[in-house]
Image: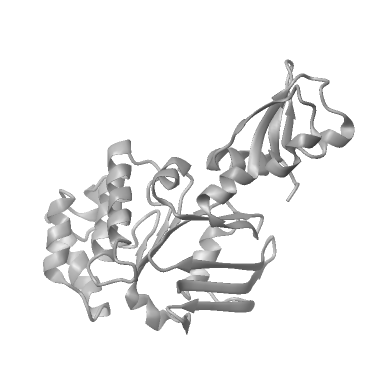
């Protein structure tokens, strides 16, 4: 069973197109959502939350067509909070609680204490990390069944990021709950994600188990004249240096390169970098 099901989703802008994308977020799982800036991650999230409307395709949340009415069951953490700068944490609670029938004030207080937040401090006085934790406290205090996070860990120190990753793992211990986690910090996904959806230029390149993606590609390195023109075409993100070349190939095609070429396992960050270097899909 899935908490999110997306099929044939399209959204057209003058300079960008979300092109027929589809993926599922299973119950009890953390789905990492990766891609370069401008690839379509935030647009997809806005469509899921019914902030904007799709041109074509369908989105189902908890088996129902996506609508703002379902957002009361979704916890959202964005890159920057949408709270008024002069609000305190208590003001935030007073403002958002009426929108959530299952708001739990005691649980919110628990998270405020757990995160070391000061009820008296205004939003504008909080560090970036504390602002993210305030959003998390809200997201986790109304019995949400789905968490959607859009770049929440960028700019945070390793300790704060690790605390957030622990919270996400704790959240999906309830096998009815899911997380869609968009981030550029792929090491966080290496630790937490069960699945990866990789979007590039408005198209889904891969969606599936994390290990399947990293095993599908291999980093390659070699001398400056080691590859023929046809072999170079196999290399995604081919880059020539003074001492040689580097890039990435589909693991199934490694045997087509010379045996003298060096190979090593790649990771999520490497896959994003090499794909970004190349127009090859």
Please tell me which residue is depicted at 41% across the width and 61% down the height of the picture.
Answer: 29
Residue 191, above or below 257: below
Q: In this view, does 275 lie to the left or right of 61?
A: right
Residue 9 in view, yes or no: yes
Please tell me which residue is depicted at 60% across the width and 74% down the height of the picture.
Answer: 7
The quadrant where residue 55 appears? bottom right
Residue 118 in view, yes or no: no
Q: Is residue 181 left or right of residue 266?
A: left
Compare residues 174 and 17 and report the one nearer the observer.
174
Q: Where is residue 252 in the image (x, y as percent from the top left)?
A: 72, 43
Please tell me which residue is depicted at 88% across the width and 32% down the height of the picture.
Answer: 229
Residue 254, above or below 27: above
Q: How is the image coloured?
A: one colour
* Most distant residue in the right direction: 229
Quarter of the image with the N terminus in it: bottom left
The quadrant where residue 167 appears? bottom left
Q: Where is residue 144 in the image (x, y as percent from the top left)?
A: 30, 71
The quadrant where residue 95 appears? bottom left
Compare residues 170 and 92 and report the one nearer the observer.
170
Q: Position of residue 217 (x, y in %)?
A: 65, 42
Q: In this view, does 96 lie to the left or right of 280?
A: left
Q: Is residue 103 left or right of residue 239?
A: left
* Most distant residue in the top direction: 243
């Amino acid at each position: 069973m899935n908490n999110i099901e997306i099929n044939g989703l399209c959204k057209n802008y003058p300079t960008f197109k979300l092109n027929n994308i589809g993926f599922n977020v299973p119950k009890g799982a953390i789905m990492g959502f990766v891609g370069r800036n401008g690839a379509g991650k935030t647009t997809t999230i806005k469509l899921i939350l019914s902030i904007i409307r799709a041109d074509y395709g369908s989105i189902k949340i908890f088996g129902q067509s996506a609508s703002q009415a379902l957002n009361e069951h979704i916890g959202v953490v964005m890159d920057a909070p949408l709270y008024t700068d002069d609000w305190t944490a208590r003001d935030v609670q007073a403002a958002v609680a009426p929108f959530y029938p299952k708001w739990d004030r005691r649980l919110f207080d628990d998270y405020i204490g757990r995160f070391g937040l000061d009820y008296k401090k205004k939003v504008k006085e909080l560090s970036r990390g504390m602002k993210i934790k305030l959003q998390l406290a809200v997201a986790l205090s109304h019995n949400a069944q789905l968490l959607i996070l859009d770049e929440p860990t960028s700019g945070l120190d390793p300790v704060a990021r690790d605390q957030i990753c622990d919270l996400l793992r704790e959240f999906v211990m309830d096998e009815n709950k899911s997380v869609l986690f968009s981030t550029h910090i792929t090491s966080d996904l290496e630790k937490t994600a069960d699945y990866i959806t990789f979007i590039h230029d408005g198209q889904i390149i891969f969606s599936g188990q994390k290990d399947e993606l990293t095993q599908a590609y291999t980093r390659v390195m070699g001398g400056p004249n080691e590859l023929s023109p046809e072999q170079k075409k196999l290399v995604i993100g081919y880059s020539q240096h003074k001492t040689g070349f580097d890039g990435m190939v589909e693991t199934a095609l490694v045997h087509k390169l010379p045996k003298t070429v060096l190979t090593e396992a790649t990771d999520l960050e490497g896959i994003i970098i090499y794909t970004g270097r190349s127009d090859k899909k």
